[in-house]
Image (cartoon, rainbow, N blue to C red):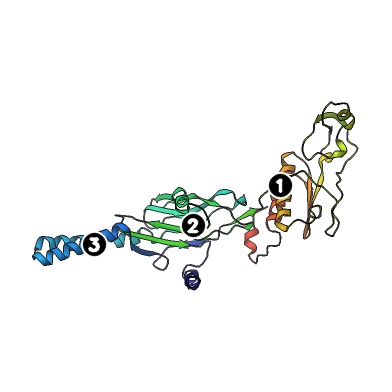
Amino acid sequence: MRENIQRYWQTWINKRIPKNDEIELSQRSIFIIPSKVGLVFSLLLILLLVTAINYQNSLIFGLSFWLFSVAMSAMIFSFRNLSGLIIKASHPTYGFVDDHVEIPIRLQSNKREYQGLQLFWPQHGIKNNKEYEANTIRDVAIIKGQEKEITIAYQLKKRGYLETPRLSLKSYYPFGLYKCWTWLSLKTPGIVFPKPIFTPFIAGEGEGDDMPSDVSLLVGNDEFLGFRNYQVGDSLKHVAWKYLAKGKGLLSKEYDSQQLSMQWLDWYSLQSMPIEKRLSHLCGWVLQAEKENRAYGLRLPNITIPPSHGDQHRTHCLTQLALYNINSNDSEKTNGFY
């Protein structure tokens, strides 16, 4: 029964407030009910009215009607405090699964100023959800003719295109008698990368099947510079074994060319791992290779990215990992990502 009600509610709200890049609030997308203070205020009005009727006291009658008119006026002002406000998505957001990010949202006021706006992303499955909402609510005020960009905290849950729940926007302005709110479904651009797992490199040539690849680095005729302390991920071919045998510690040979560090990060080198774990390992390798200034290429079953390095190359590789086996008909989502 509860699932049917929720399904009906989702269908109704999706038709009434569909997903869009930009939403202007109107009577179709604004809801209003009495707040807890408003309910107490209503009980007070009823008590005053019963008292006035019982004692036939014109002064109490006048006070009751005056307070009732204040309540009706507050309802109108509560509605006006959201009506006409324009909310739209801003620039793309990048992050890794389980990261807490700040998603930018733009608010635009063309008609009037708005006071006491509270915005946050509702997230289910979080312990102490009320405490989470209290810590992530943004209180905003906007003057007439202003466009303001704010950021709202959100925890990334799933790799792929960034998909956020409905944005909760509410206000208790002006007297706190009414809760005026809406749920907005915004098309928030962005990419969620797999959660990285950092392990030693397994760089290989990668055949076309699900067989483990031979570990190999592309070594050229580079000039030998000297030795340095061994770092996790260094090729065993460059370990100074003679020095290790003499008890001088674990050292690696260093050359003057980046080609020594060039390697392939191969999907098929992670044999018998689930898809998500493979993606997480590859994601960790990309970050690790970039940090160590290695030139690296990425081989996936559906794409091969030639070796390179730099921020653009890293973003390209991470995006392909994030979108692996994810289909989308919305070509606009990929614009400007890399």
Instruction: Say how many tags the image has.
Output: 3
Query: How many other residues sit within 10 Å of disc 2, few (<14), some (14-19) or many (≥20)?
Result: some
Residue at horizontal 52 percent and vertical 54 percent from the top: 126
Q: Tell me if residue 7 comes above or below residue 160 in the rendering.
A: below
Q: Position of residue 337 (x, y in %)?
A: 65, 54
Q: Position of residue 245 (x, y in %)?
A: 88, 29
Q: In terms of secondary structure, where does tag 3 sit?
A: helix
Q: Nearer the viewer, residue 75 or 47?
A: 47
Q: Tell me if residue 259 comes above or below residue 211 in the rendering.
A: above
Q: Amino acid at mark 2?
A: Pro
Residue at label 3?
43
Q: Tell me if residue 81 comes above or below residue 315 in the rendering.
A: below
Q: Amino acid at mark 1?
A: Gly
Q: Are marks 2 and 3 in contact (CB under 8 Å)?
A: no
Q: Position of residue 299 (x, y in %)?
A: 79, 54
Residue at label 2?
122
Residue at label 1?
284
In space, the residues marked 2 and 3 are separated at their CA atoms by 31 Å
